[in-house]
Amino acid sequence: MLGERIPLRRVKTMRKALSGKNMLNNFLKEHAYRLSQISFRGSNLTSHPLRNIKDLVYLANITIGTPPQEFQVFLDTGSSDLWVPSDFCTSPACSKHVRFRHLQSSTFRLTSKTFSITYGSGRIKGVVAHDTVRIGDLVSTDQPFSLSMAEYGLEHIPFDGILGLNYPNVSSSGAIPIFDKLKNQGAISEPVFAFYLSKDEQEGSVVMFGGVDHRYYKGKLNWVPLIQAGNWIIHMDSISIERKVIACSGGCVAFVDIGTAFIEGPKPLVDNMQKLIRAKPWRSKHYVSCSAVNTLPSITFTINGINYPVPGRAYILKDSRRRCYSTFKEIPLSPTTEFWMLGDVFLRLYFSVFDRGNDRIGLARAV
């Protein structure tokens, strides 16, 4: 059942500037709740043990080309494109990462299509190509992917590229995402993927494709319908401390994002949250006394009528000098709708299932 080990490496948080164009359209028009269950019994589940380092971001080993060339990519539910640097890229950022040598692959095919993506921390541009891509024992032949020819502002990000797991309509290049291609080729029996993120740098983080391994969570999966098919965005009821609502008071929008390390929200509400947990600003972070972590209140996120508490020990991390800092961060953009990003701090506590077949997300208490 368990596939190959995909080692992960520590990365600084990549702050994505998400385009708000279609994301928040009709955000109040919720989908009717779908009762159909995924038939996990007998499904062809591919599960990869992952290694968690520093509780930050998750990198997976994939290969591209024939013979295979290995890359460290960042798994991301906030984007849909797969890209790695091209051998032709001369930007300083590319020279610090593994570049794809297309002349050495017998299955490589170039297209005339170009692409560009802007992130909060930089931008890339390049061309779309096709080749064989492998994630563990999953193989996508003639997979469209992007080769960056120029990268700006990404010199200090220690991963080669990104593998997006969002819907096809979010793709910057217009290429079919690898998850859809694997599904269409029959490599994945159910249109589902799931994440178990281990805590405190322990071994055991897992990404699974094609089904769910029930050993990774307790109780039942609570299904939350997406606001609209096409993005991993859900409706959240409220955020509270000790039964007092402190944010999202009239309901709000939440993006469930493996590609975000922390929990991010609007600046005034995050500032108030920092005050309530007595976190003091210093440089780019808000710090608390490490001796006070166990006395900090739980912050409860209520989603679809169910409470998901996040205790102090989960929302406080230690920096390189072993000082304790808050993982609540100001969101890098300010849409008109109150908008939160539930990143790895939340998803370490709650096992997450991304169900493309029913346009919903399943959450359950992680083991």
Image (tube, rainbow, N blue to C red):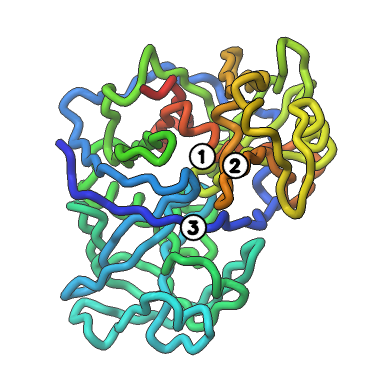
Q: Who's the residue at 18% across and 52% down the image?
A: 137
Q: Is residue 223 visible?
A: yes
Query: Is there a contact, CB below 8 Å, between mark 2 and mark 1?
Result: yes
Counting residues from the N terminus, which is met first, the one under dot 2 or under dot 1? 2
Query: Is there a contact, CB below 8 Å, between mark 1 and mark 3?
Result: no
Q: Which mark is residue 262?
A: 2
- Camera-side residue: 139 or 54? 54
- Residue 79: where, in percent of width, then height? 52, 54
Q: Label 1, label 3: how many angstroms apart (C-alpha)?
A: 13 Å
For badge 1, the amino acid type reads Asp
Badge nearest the viewer, 1 or 3? 3
Number of marks: 3
Query: Is there a contact, CB below 8 Å, between mark 3 and mark 2?
Result: no
- Residue 299: where, in percent of width, then height? 66, 22
**As drawn, is 251 to the left or to the right of 44?**
right
**As drawn, is 69 to the left or to the right of 222?**
left
For badge 3, the amino acid type reads Val
Q: Which mark is residue 344?
A: 1
Q: Who's the residue at 43% across and 20% down the image?
A: 365
Q: Who's the residue at 40% across and 48% down the image?
A: 53
Would you call the spot at circle 1 few (<14 residues within 10 Å), some (14-19), or many (20 or more)?
many
SS type, badge 3: loop
SS type, badge 2: loop
302, above or below 161, in the image? above
